Amino acid sequence: MVFQIVSKHELCDYYDLNQNPGITLKIPIREDKFAFLDDTKISQQLISFQNEEQLHVTFYLPQMHCSSCLYLLENLYRINPGVVSSKVNFTRKEVEIVLIKKATSLRKVAETLAGIGYEPYISLSDLRNKRPGLDQQMVYQIGVAGFCFGNIMLMSFPEYLGIDTSEEGMLQLFRWANLFLAIPVFLYSALPFYKASWKSLKHKYLNIDAPIALAIIITFIRSVIEVLEGTGGGYFDSMTGIVFFMLAGRILQDKTYRQLSFERDYTSYFPVAVAVLKEGKQVPTALPDIRVNDTLLIHQEELIPADGILVKGKAFIDYSFVTGESMPVLKEMGEIVYAGGKQTEGNIELLVVKEVAQSYLTKLWNREEFQEKATPKKYSFVHALSRYFTYIVFLIAAITAAYWWREDLSKLWPAVTSIFIIACPCALLLSNTFTNGNILTILARNQFFLRNAETIESIAGVNHLVFDKTGTLTAPGEQEVAFIGKDLSTEEQQLISSLANQSTHPLSKAIVHWLRPDNYLQVENKLEKVGAGIEGIVQGKRIRMGSIAFVKQSTQDSIAAGTQVHVEIENVYLGFFKFGNQYRNEIPGLIKLLMSEYKISVLSGDNPTERETLEQLTDHSSTLLFNQQPEDKLLYIKSLQQKGDKVMMIGDGLNDAGALKQADVGVALSEQSNNFTPSSDAIIEAKKLVKLNQFIQLCKKNRGIVMASFVLSIVYNVIGLYFAVQGNLSPLIAAILMPSSSISILLLTFGSSNLAARQLRL
Amino acid sequence: MSVIFILLAVSISVAAFFLIAFIWGVKSGQFEDDFSPASRILFEDKKTSSPHKQ
């Protein structure tokens, strides 16, 4: 984390760096960090193309953030002459590199990138599957539909306005041209609707696409017959228009956030390979090939991929990925270290006791529930609504057919077909997709990203909110610091913070952050002992700070080493710093607000020392559970669901991943949207958590807006049906009804969803 | 009125040209990334004959 921030600040200077050749600002990286890229078995999965000379590879660089980054990365060939070209895709934060095999290697390029501050992020899941992109097929389809729709409208004008009988031949020409233009729409652009309805019929569930596909087919057939018989121009304009609008709605709704991933499992957190010690040599080994009894060498800042026993070194492990708690935990030799933590100081050696897939943390993912989607697929209320709608349309069609069968057989076909043309639930689909799309956009603008449109409805139905405490209600990195002991003078404060500033340890950083000194003094004879403490001479005074064992120079080890920092100046013991949780500022207000409407639970992986604070926060009316293992959290959500509650889980770390997946809506909290979040239905920026109530309110409005525009569309339908049942739906009426209903629905959905958002101050 | 035939052919071919241009644009990834090309044009292209020395 710290590395990321530091490097980010330095990065913008790189622009200057490149204009002043000669000055280098290299970030040191461990020598063989990318050694695994020399292993052909691993690198093979990364390379997109290679021949005798060249090699194409795409790296994901999460640190990329400004136009200077772009400049630097695209000028990579100056830094590493073996690079032929590098092309950045900023939205995906990817760089596509072409390199000459003879001059450089994959490993060297990765090292170059890491050296300039853009460490490529290579993970197991990246190797296995490519990230999904924009649905290009649908974009082509809408392009074709737009082209045909525009031209057909143009050529239908003679039809609308009437044409001189002497120009009858020309009218026929226009009709035939329309027919040919409509074919690509019918056969290509409308494909998504055919596919969706076929799928729904196979599952014996009538969704909204089925009546729409039916309407498209009937309209096309009837229009073709009219043109062939020369009796009329058909309804090609309406058909192509509606296909165009409906595709536009679909695209808006399915817009994805390419910079985010909602599908991460544990493999994205883990490195691709790790160094295994074999007869004193380091062998880079891919994670799945790690076996029990292998000895792993874990370097500083590396993730621990498998459960193991510490055999060498002192582990100081940051479990923030797992628990959300950034305070490192000290482990001694012989202790078991669980996978998922990050070693923060020095190198350690681990003897593997469980393979990666069997590890305590990863086992959670291999639970049966997760093999498929935990909850059965939910269908939107729109489908149910459209079903009723379809039944009514069929009823009207049947009555009309019966009537005309007795009265005038020649009118049976035109009357019944016009009913299907007019009364397709296109308007419902339009209002639904456009409202969803707009709400997704509004929420995304407020940094609340939803996985898909169905999540809107799931959020609207929620009645129980479950919060994770560590990292969600409390802010990671923001520790409440207190000094217990003698009152510190300004001079002492300055001495302490000057020394603490020399260390990258999170506790030292927290102390510096808390003391806020005006300036730092020169530190001499600095000595940092990993996992124990730091000492140095500031202004001639010897200062020692760290664990009790370090400061008092005794051999006994304190259990609370991780949360206390003791201070001694010139052999005089002053006292110790204590660290506690700091709740995010806006949390108390938010909880009060939410409590009036929802049931609230708080789960915590920590011990119950915070119980009192939390009880005050929730007015003693919520369920508070402590010492919750990842599995306990999942089971708690499950028990709530069995009671009939619709649960929204808000959590951050990997330890919440199971619960997030089990919940009806899993919301992952992210400190920066490019951060790694466990797989979830929604990702919320931590700063925006305060708006959670408004977000839920907006999602609830969604249904109302869809219903309102549906009512409006029914009005149009009734007008259309009035003409249709009589068997005289003229192309002109259809041509006016279709666009005006579509456009007024678009205006209504956009207007009312934006209005709702404004009322909620989003 | 036979001029209409020519106009018809012209208008359709112009529209078809734009359709092809659109499809080409999507295919070549012009809509994939809307940030980098916009910034890329602002960077000066320094022609360095000798390789950049580190």
Image: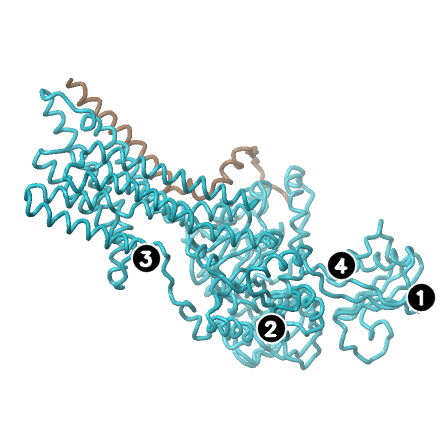
Chain colours: A cyan, B brown
Q: Earlier in the sequence, mark 4 or mark 3?
A: 3
Give me the chain letter of mark 3.
Answer: A
Residue depth check, mark 4 versus mark 3: number of the one nearer the observer: 3
A78 over A585 or under it: above or below = above
Question: Where residue A570 is drawn, which disc sits there?
Answer: 1
Residue A600 spot, x, y in % from top left: 58, 65
Q: Is residue A712 left or right of residue A625?
A: left
Residue depth check, mark 1 versus mark 4: number of the one nearer the observer: 4
Residue type, numbered disc 2 = Lys
Residue type, numbered disc 1 = Glu
Residue B29 spot, x, y in % from top left: 41, 43
Residue type, numbered disc 3 = Ala
Marks 4 and 3 on same chain: yes
Residue depth check, mark 2 versus mark 1: number of the one nearer the observer: 1
Q: Look at mark 3 in the image and give the residue it sits on.
A: A384
Give me the chain letter of mark 4.
Answer: A
Q: Earlier in the sequence, mark 1 or mark 4?
A: 4
Give me the chain letter of mark 1.
Answer: A
Q: From mark 4 to mark 3, how far is it between C-alphas?
A: 56 Å
A5 over B8 or under it: above or below = below
Callout 1 crowding tier (Cα within 10 Å): few <14, some 14–19, many ≥20: few
